[in-house]
Amino acid sequence: MAITVAAPGLEPIAAPEASARKRRYTEDQVPIGRLLLRMLAGLVVLIVFILPYTIMFFGSVKTKAQIRSVDPTYLPTEWHWENYLNMWSTPETPLVQNLISTIVISVFATLLVLLVAMPAAYYTARFLFPGRMVFLFLVIVTQMLQPAVLTSGLFRQFVALDLIDTWAAMIFINAAFNLSFAVWIMHSFFAGVPKEVDEAAQIDGAGRLTVLFKINLPLVWPGIVTAIVFTFVACWNEFAASLVILSTAGNQPLSVALTKFVGQYETSWHYVFGVSIVAIVPVVVLFMLIEKRLVGGLTAGSVK
């Protein structure tokens, strides 16, 4: 509560608390011109990022003749919404099976990454074992290796294991190439939880698994969500290894199926755009559902 001090013949003097609060409020005010500039800059950035997807959407509801017209237009002269229905029954590729394949590979690869990365990150954050830093260094080095560089070796390996052209092969590949990122980001979050929390739980009789899943996981949930999102998106967009490992059209994900509409002499651009829009929607929905926790995970640790 503000306190004023009045002296005989003088105006009341505001207490320092009230004047400081008023000064802070005044300093936080943003001039209208600067606010408009910020809004304009944000609008420009939004247009730059949204414009390619907008053009892609308009192309998906055009006919092949409209897209290849000598005098093209951005907006379609006729809106052909049936493209989104016809593309599922085209002879180029079975899109329904491709979508199912993409979902199965991405979901199970993400679950496998979490199953392995959580205990590994927790152990490396809690215990100082010999070779710990070497192990963490080797984990991050694997992030520099990409499936496109190792496709021939991966092909021979899964032929030997009799797993070629199977979902299991792509689940293992996607999990392996995203495991290092998940371990590192979870390691930093587990390391930020005081060890006294674990010790207090163990004094109360909790075992290691109980401490991990019931005590630590709720505290590092933003990091878990961040790892889930980036792993799922990476698995969803994977292309190079799927192109080599999966030869059956129905087993291939959408990223590979998309190339079937690009021919040597002719390209069905309206289907290419339509499939691209369909492939983007699940990722956008995932980001919308867990946006708050994702932002929390990305910014955690930036302010002490």
Image (tube, rainbow, N blue to C red):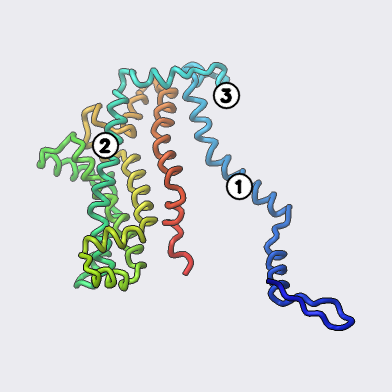
Other residues around mark 1 within 10 Å, as few (<14) / some (14–19) / many (≥20): few
Q: Where is residue 61 drawn, in percent x and y?
A: 49, 22
Mark sitting on residue 276: none
- Amino acid, disc 1: Gly
Q: Where is residue 106 drawn, in percent x and y?
A: 29, 40
Q: Describe residue 35's horizontal placement relative to residue 235 as left or right.
A: right
- Amino acid, disc 3: Leu
The kind of secondary structure element at disc 3 is: loop
Q: CA distance from mark 1 to mark 2?
A: 37 Å
Give the residue number, with chain letter if any, for mark 1: 42
Most extreme residue toward the bottom is: 8
Other residues around mark 2 within 10 Å, as few (<14) / some (14–19) / many (≥20): some
Q: Where is residue 24 drawn, in percent x and y?
A: 68, 68
Give the residue number, with chain letter if any, for mark 2: 104
Residue plotted at (43% across, 65% down): 301
Q: CA distance from mark 2 to mark 3?
A: 36 Å
Of the numbered discs 1 and 3, the one sitting upstream in the chain is 1
Which dot, 1 or 3, sits closer to the camera? 1
> Relative to 12, does residue 78 appear above or below in the rendering?
above
Q: CA distance from mark 1 to mark 3?
A: 25 Å
Residue plotted at (35% across, 67% down): 193
Image quarter for residue 161? Answer: top left
Mark sitting on residue 75: 3
Please say whether residue 1 is visible from this viewpoint: yes
Please say whether residue 133 is visible from this viewpoint: no
Image quadrant occupied by the N terminus:
bottom right
